[in-house]
Amino acid sequence: MSKILGINISHDCAFAYFEDGILKEFYEESRFNKIKHWGPTAEIDNIYEYKALKKFKDIEFDVICFSSWGRDHLILEHLIIRHILTQINYKNKPMYFDVLQHHIHHATGGYYFSNFKEALVLVCDGGGEKYDFKKIDRNDAWSYERGIFPTFKVMESIFYINNKNIKELYKCFSDNHDNVMKKVNKNYKNQEDVYGLHPIKDTDIRFTDKLVGGFKYQNYCEAAGFPAHSEGQLMGLAAYKNKKTDLNKKMLNIAHEAQKETLKERIQLVEKAMTYSNCKNIILSGGYHLNCANNFKLVKHFPNLNFFVDPIPYDAGCAVGVVKYYENYFR
């Protein structure tokens, strides 16, 4: 019997236990420590005792799979992983971890829960895999002397997936440093290595200095005065735009624009996905797709497509996805 544990060490830290490819147990650490959206940090992780891991104290795992979103330094990921391994019944068995596969873990997690034999998976969140510009900014004395190294993040992706293969069709990188993105785009089009991002065969790559998807939605939340991880409040507020209410008009307008603009983007991404394949099955994953109001509007907008929304579209679901990626596509 194969026993594999998937662990998401991003925010919404989670654990997914599989036996022979079947999900048996799933826990989010925030349900135990009562800290919403909790994620480990290297600063406190060497003393933190994971409550969820006690559920597995009598299980000896064959493989441990880790998923993350990409911290500023890989050593921070390693410190967190090393501490977690001290709390698991784990005896020099295989371990899988690739920090630059965040969106693919969203995709494989969503596919696992669907009944589709094949599908196009659209992933949108606030920033998945992350790359830095240290080498590029050496040409920018002002930035380099001050240690300012902008990062560019994967904001949206499109994958084709079936039981045997997963193919990345499209990837969008976003950053609000216009001069940097122009340099990156030029290098990439010239088939040069963009500091960790090698040209990907048969994958459509877009670089933009515009805010996209979940990243854009987060900025709308800040503009409306909401704290981090309050996207649900902004979504709910938008429903009162044309109703009699004492709610702040400025906040209502911001919420309405957030829904309107990001829905337009999601419609365009579905249309783009249809240019790559005739497959009519669409899976929505990534934190943005907690937005049930816009998910519903997408379904209504495309009546001839079959939609499935990942039941754990936020980062916790990557604990599921990383195991399915390892079992079905990586090995």
Image (cartoon, rainbow, N blue to C red):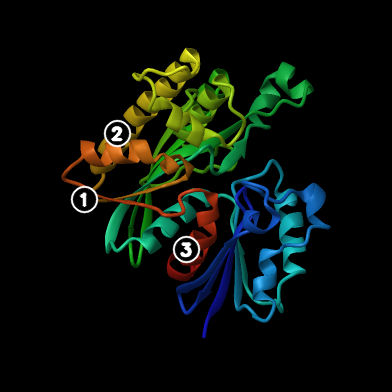
Q: In this view, does 36 lie above or below 110?
A: above
Residue 5 x, y percent position in the rendering: 58, 70
Instruction: Specify the label residue 81 is tagged with.
Output: none
Disc 2, SS: helix
Of the image marks 2 and 1, the number of the one nearer the N terminus: 2
Instruction: Estimate how packed mark 2 is, as few (under 14), some (14 to 19) or many (20 or more) residues with alpha carbons within 10 Å.
Output: some
Query: Of residues 305 and 259, which is closer to you in this image?
Result: 259
- The x and y percentages for residue 128 are 54, 43
Q: Of discs 3 and 2, which sits in the foreground?
A: 2
Q: Which of marks 3 and 2 is nearer the N terminus?
A: 2
Residue 187 visible in the snapshot: no
**Circle 3 SS class:** helix
- Calculate the distance from the C-alpha at mark 2 to the C-alpha at mark 1: 15 Å
- The amino acid type found where label 1 is placed reads Lys
The residue that appears at 67% across and 22% down in the rendered structure is 139
In the rendered structure, which disc, 1 or 3, sits on the residue that comes first in sequence? 1
Q: Is residue 250 above or below residue 37?
A: above
Relative to 110, residue 249 above or below? above
Q: Which residue is drawn at 50% across and 48% down?
A: 314
Secondary structure at badge 1 equals: loop
- Whole-percent x, y for residue 62 in the image: 60, 78
- Which residue is painted at 48% across and 19% down in the image? 247
Front residue of 1/184: it is 1
Is residue 81 left or right of 213 when viewed as pictured?
right
Judging by the rendered image, the residue that carries numbered circle 2 is 267
Residue at the disc numbered 1 = 280
Against 217, is 56 above or below? Answer: below
Amino acid at the residue labelled 3: Tyr
> Can you identify the residue that label 3 sits on?
325
Q: Quadrant of residue 138?
A: top right
